[in-house]
Image (spheres, rainbow, N blue to C red):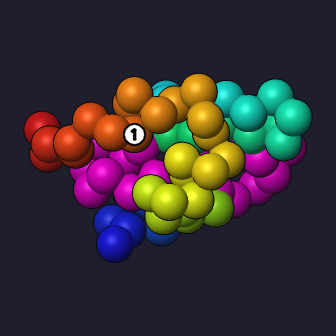
């Protein structure tokens, strides 16, 4: 479930942890540090796409280790 910071996404700031890059799809994967929501940022897109864990694992195979770590709220 997304939080207010995710819904009002204003760019990749210190509120988001970078988890991986998919060069073929021109996307980056981030996790919100507030709620744990996974966000996919497409190059030159204005808004993020919210992903499930399954979708993130499918689209970002190099980020498996980071995705398998349990999310702990700060």
Q: Residue at x 76, y 55 (%)?
A: 46
Picture coordinates of residue 50 (x, y %)? Answer: 55, 64
Q: Which of 3 and 25 is in front in this view?
A: 25
What is the quadrant of residue 73 in the picture? top left
Q: Residue at x 31, y 52 (%)?
A: 36
Q: Would you place residue 29 above or below residue 21 in this image?
A: below
Direction from residue 55 to residue 36 in the image, left or right: left
Q: Residue at x 50, y 60 (%)?
A: 54
What is the quadrant of residue 66 in the picture? top left
Q: Does the magenta stretch include residue 41?
A: yes
Which class describes the residues within 10 Å of circle 1: few (<14), some (14-19), or many (20+)? some
Q: Would you place residue 31 above or below residue 19 in this image?
A: below
Direction from residue 2 to residue 63 in the image, left or right: right
Circle 1: element type: helix
Picture coordinates of residue 45 (x, y %)? Answer: 81, 52
Number of labelled discs?
1
Q: Is residue 33 magenta?
A: yes
Q: Which residue lies furthest to the bottom in this view?
A: 1
Residue beneath disc 1: 67
Quarter of the picture holding the C terminus: top left
Q: Nearer the viewer, residue 73 or 65?
A: 65
Quarter of the picture holding the N terminus: bottom left
Q: Which residue is drawn at 27% across and 35% down?
A: 69
Span of residues in magenta: 31-48
Picture coordinates of residue 30 (x, y %)? Answer: 50, 40
Q: Can residue 12 be seen from the camera position used here?
A: no
Q: Which of 3 and 64 is in front in this view?
A: 64
Picture coordinates of residue 37 (x, y %)? Answer: 39, 57
Principal secondary structure, stretch drawn in magenta: loop
Q: Can residue 65 be seen from the camera position used here?
A: yes
């Amino acid at each position: 479930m997304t939080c207010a910071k995710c819904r009002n996404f204003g760019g990749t700031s210190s509120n988001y942890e970078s988890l991986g890059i998919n060069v073929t799809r021109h996307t980056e994967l981030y996790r919100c540090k507030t709620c744990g929501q996974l966000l996919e940022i497409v190059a030159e897109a204005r808004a993020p796409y919210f992903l499930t864990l399954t979708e993130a694992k499918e689209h970002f195979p190099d980020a498996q280790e980071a995705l398998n770590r349990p999310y702990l709220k700060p």
